[in-house]
Amino acid sequence: MVIVWVWKMELGVLVGF
């Protein structure tokens, strides 16, 4: 799912990963 991919990317940016 593209939504999950974007969500994971957002999480990565938030945690600075």
Image (tube, rainbow, N blue to C red):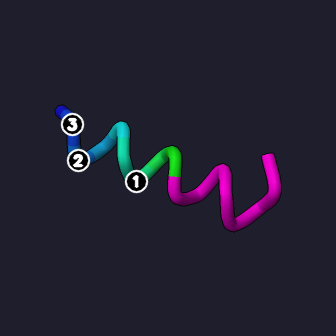
The Cα atoms of the two marked residues, 1 and 2, are separated by 6 Å
Q: Residue 3 got which mark?
A: 2
Asked if the magenta segment contains residue 11, the reply would be yes
Q: Which residue is drawn at the image coordinates 31% and 43% (left, top)?
A: 4
Q: Which mark is residue 7?
A: 1
Q: Secondary structure at mark 1?
A: helix
Corner quadrant of residue 5: top left
Residue type of the residue flagged with mark 2: Ile
The reply to whether the C-beta atoms of the residues labelled 1 and 2 are less than 8 Å apart is yes
Residue occupying image coordinates x 81% and y 56%:
16
- Label 3 vs 1, first from the N-terminus: 3
Which label sits on residue 2? 3
What is the quadrant of residue 2 in the picture? top left
CB-based contact (under 8 Å), mark 2 and mark 3: yes
Q: Is residue 1 above or below residue 15?
A: above
- The stretch of residues the image draws in magenta is 10-17
Q: Residue at x 18, y 33 (%)?
A: 1
Q: Answer above or below: position of 9 versus 5.
A: below
Locate residue 14, reporting x and y percent: 68, 66
The Cα–Cα distance between marks 3 and 1, rounded to whole angstroms, is: 9 Å
Question: Is 10 left, or right, of 5 in this rendering?
Answer: right
Residue 13 falls within the magenta-colored stretch: yes
Horizontal relation, residue 10 to residue 16: left or right:
left
Q: Amino acid at mark 1?
A: Trp
